[in-house]
Image (tube, rainbow, N blue to C red):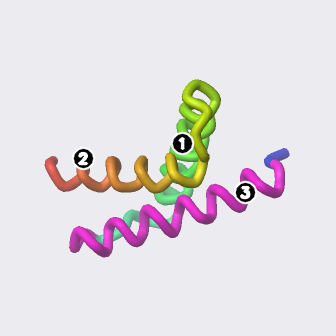
Amino acid sequence: MIGFFRKQQERLAERFIRRQYEKKGLAPPDDITLSLQAAQMVAEAHHIAKKRGQNVLTILKELADDLITDLKRR
């Protein structure tokens, strides 16, 4: 079972991703894809935070920016 805070982080990550798509003028993916991207992003943020000792929220913002930048280049 996913913890309360982890689920909240995933919801926040979804909003970050959706906002980044809008800022870049791209159509956001369907809800299932968006949810999977958010879950992967949160997992990666926790992994990075564990290694670097940084704040998960800051890392989530950076990862959302990186994701959209990569999509824009394709």
Question: What x and y, as percent, mark residue 60?
Answer: 51, 51
Element type where label 3 sits in the image: helix
Q: Quadrant location of the N terminus?
A: top right
Q: Earlier in the sequence, mark 1 or mark 2?
A: 1
The numbered dot on residue 7 is 3
Q: Amino acid at mark 3?
A: Lys
Is 46 or 34 nearer to us in this picture?
Answer: 46
Q: Amino acid at mark 2?
A: Asp
Crowd class of label 3 (few under 14; some 14 to 19; many from 20; radius 10 Å): some
Specify whether 3 is left or right of 62: right
Give above or below for 62 relative to 51: below
Crowd class of label 2 (few under 14; some 14 to 19; many from 20; radius 10 Å): few
- Residue drawn 55% across and 41% down? 45
Is 32 or 60 nearer to us in this picture?
Answer: 60
Q: Which residue is mark 1?
A: 40
- Residue drawn 42% across and 69% down? 18
- Residue drawn 46% across and 56% down? 61
Specify whether 60 is left or right of 21: right
Question: What x and y, as percent, mark residue 70?
Answer: 24, 46
Q: Amino acid at mark 1?
A: Gln
Element type where label 1 sits in the image: helix
Marks 1/2: CA–CA distance: 15 Å
Is residue 56 one of those drawn in magenta? no
CB atoms at circles 2 and 3 under 8 Å apart?
Answer: no
Magenta span of residues: 3-26
